[in-house]
Every structure is written in C-alpha cells, then in structure tokens.
Image: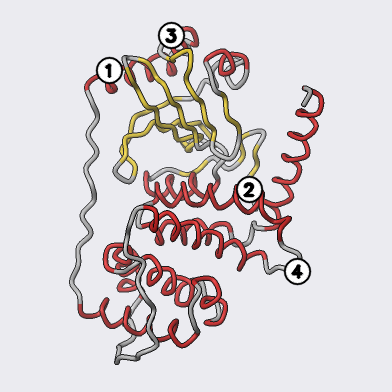
Amino acid sequence: MDHLTTHTLQGQANDLRQKFEEEIRDFSDGLWNYCRYLTGSPWDGEDLYQETMLKVLGGLYTRWHPTNLKSYIFRIATNTWIDQCRKEKRTLGVLSEENEAFEEFSDNLELEEALLQLNDLFTPRQTAVFLLLEIFRFHADEVASIVRTTPGAVYASVRRIKHKLQTTKHQTIKPKHGVSHQKSKVIKAYLNAFNHGDLDGMLSLISDQAHYEASLGFLEVNKNEIKNGSLAYGLPGHHAIECELWGKHVIVVLAESDQDLCVHDIQYQEVENNKIVYHRSFFFRKEFIVAASKELGYKPQLNKPPLNWEDK
C-alpha cells in the first residue's frame, strides 16, 4: 500500500470518526459512566470506553439490519468487559429467575454508594444487569439480549442485588499506588522542562523508541515522530502540575481561561532506565477530561483548538 493510499484511508477514517461522535453525542457521557461503574474504576472504565469505540467503528459493517446505535454500543461495552473477565478467570455468574423479597432505595445517596460497591460485591454479569436496567433504563428484553439471559432472570437478579445492597455494609478500599524514586526524578525533570518551555530538555528525557498515545486521537511510535509531529510547533506554554487522580499519579496540564485555570490535558508516563518509554495523553477524551476535572476541583477547558466541546 503506497503512502497516498494510506493517507486517503486515514482521512476517510477520521471523517467517519467525527460523524460517529456526532451520532453518539447524546449518550457518550452515560456510556463512559457505565464503563466506569461496570469495571469499578475510572481508569479501567476509560480503557473499556476506548476499546468499545474502536470495536464499534471497526465492526458496524457487520450489522445488516437496522440498528439501535445506543443499545448496540452498550452491548459491545458489556461483552468486551465480560470477555476480559473471562480471560482473567473471574466468575461470571449464572442469572437465575428465582425471586426474593427486596426493599427500594430510600434516597439517591444510597444509590450513589451502591454504584461504588457493585464491582466488589457482584459478578460482572450481575453488575451489568443492574446498571443497564436500573441506571441506564434499558428495557428488560434489551438487557436480556445484551447479557444473554432471559427477562425474568433480569428482574430477579436486580431484586437480589437490591436486597444484598440493603443488607450488606461494605466499604470500598482504594488501592495505593506508589511511585518509584527513579520515576519521580524523571517526572520532576519533565515538569521542569515543560513549565520552562524547554523542548530540548524534555526530549532528552524521552527514549528514542518511546510511544506517545493521545487516546482516540493519534499514536506516535518513536521520538522522531514525536519531535516532528505533536511537538513540531514546540510546547503549548501552559502550566503542568503533578496530582493524584483516582489512585494514580498523573500530570495535569492547566490553561488560563477567563481568569480561571482549566484542565487542558491529563497525562501519565511510564519510565524505565531513566527514560520515558510511554506517554499517554487524554487531550481528545471529553468525557474523561470532564469527569477528572470535577474530581480535581477545576473546570475543564472545553474550547481548545482543534477541539470545541462547548454546547455539545
């Protein structure tokens, strides 16, 4: 395949992605939250969201019948997660139609607490059934189709889950993530170079074979591509700080906007032998940036060329 053909296919794929994002705009936030609660982690949820998007974009051509896009995408997300759990030898569980008595939730606070406990208390299929029926309001027959069971089992499973949530006292323990001395030293040097606009100093910290992934945006697979691609016009002139976000140490890039500091990007790096070997950016990930900004106590930057998420 020649360079011209590759370039044409890349352009067509980008156009398709933009049209696709327009089509799912109304429920993309809900899908991100579904992935977050289904996996029990914003980080795992973000990975699941991205994998789902790639699978849907690559697999829509196999649908020969009229398709409810929302139902189809939630189905892909659910099956992708269940398949991953199966590979990890996790118990997926059987959904029985037997009924048990249960009580309704008394207020929204109890429901919010329940969402944080689902992944620890229930199997992946049980969690999916509860979220799809109770939170995202799919019909029971849709849920049954997505998780491959019967509507009666869907209703019975939700009743049992509610009963257990009402009678189980559970506290989620957040994992602690340590940062090696080697990584901390390199990241501090990276922050210093970034904040002083020292492009050469920053590039000196990056391995020649480093991967730079801007999730659902672009991928660069060595320093030369990084230098001549995403960093071809230098550093953006924003300020970066190191923070802990959902148990992970990250770099938060802040931009000034209307006298406020807004989250421009969130990044994290992997370091080996005093070199950055992997750099991940969430610049293109609206749902992730918005949720992370809320967690960090900042506003998200919604208008940052080439992206404009305002009123969308």
Label disc, if present, on residue 238 of the rendered structure: none
Mark 3 and mark 2: Cα distance apart in space: 36 Å
Q: Residues within 10 Å of mark 1 (few under 14, many from 20)?
A: few
Label disc, if present, on residue 65 of the rendered structure: 4
Q: Residues within 10 Å of mark 2 (few under 14, many from 20)?
A: few
Amino acid type at circle 2 is: Glu
Question: Closer to the N terminus: mark 4 or mark 3?
Answer: 4
Q: Residue at x 81, y 28 (%)?
A: 5
Amino acid type at circle 1 is: Lys
Mark 3 and mark 1: Cα distance apart in space: 14 Å
Q: Are marks 4 and 3 in contact (CB under 8 Å)?
A: no
Amino acid type at circle 3 is: Ser
- Give SS at disc 4: loop
Name the residue that disc number 1 marks: 185
Q: Residues within 10 Å of mark 4 (few under 14, many from 20)?
A: few
Question: Closer to the N terminus: mark 4 or mark 2?
Answer: 4
Q: Residue at x 77, y 28 (%)?
A: 7
- Report which quarter residue 85 is drawn in: bottom left
Q: Nearer the viewer, mark 4 or mark 1?
A: 4
- Give SS at disc 2: loop
Asked if residue 139 is positioned above or below residue 61 in the image, the reply reads below
Q: Position of 189 compared to 21: left or right? A: left
Task: From the top left corner, tell me how far across and down residue 301 is, in percent.
Answer: 54, 40
Q: Nearer the viewer, mark 4 or mark 3?
A: 4
Mark 4 and mark 2: Cα distance apart in space: 34 Å
Q: Are marks 4 and 2 in contact (CB under 8 Å)?
A: no
- Report which quarter residue 164 is drawn in: bottom left
Foreground: 294 or 69? Answer: 69
Q: Nearer the viewer, mark 4 or mark 2?
A: 4
